[in-house]
Image (cartoon, helix red, strand yellow):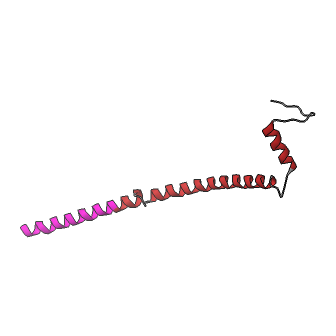
Amino acid sequence: MNRTTRPALGMLVFFAVAFALGVYFTFAAVQGDYGLFRRAEIDAEARDLAVQLAAVQAQVNEMENLTKRLSDDFLDLDLLDEQARSILGMLRADEIVIR
């Protein structure tokens, strides 16, 4: 009678350990540092960063355009006039200021 209970207890311990390992690895695959939820967070963050990159690139392109237009090689007189008026606060005699 002692022999029949021992193998059953060993099998029970084996399946309990196997089940616990299965649950642990399943949890790690879903919630862990390299799991599915972390992957979704990384994808969402990558999309946000791509949008920010596009906005910053647009600002850089605008600044490069303004810099080129005010350079010695290419002088945009309208832009120069606008900048001088903005910085110096000057007006022509035929202009009216509305605030």
Residue 53 appears in the figure: yes
Using the rendered view, name the quadrant where residue 44 is placed: bottom right
The magenta stretch is 1-24
Using the rendered view, name the quadrant where residue 13 is placed: bottom left
How far across and down, in percent of the image, does residue 1 sit? 6, 67
Q: Nearer the viewer, residue 78 or 7?
A: 78
The residue that appears at 17% across and 67% down in the rendered structure is 10
How far across and down, in percent of the image, does residue 22 sit? 32, 63
Residue 1 appears in the figure: no
Say whether residue 22 is left or right of residue 86: left
Q: Nearer the viewer, residue 96 or 80?
A: 80
How far across and down, in percent of the image, does residue 23 sit? 32, 60
Above or below, 13 relative to 41 = below
Above or below, 23 relative to 93 = below
Q: Nearer the viewer, residue 3 or 10?
A: 10
Q: Nearer the viewer, residue 40 or 20?
A: 40
Say whether residue 19 is left or right of residue 68: left
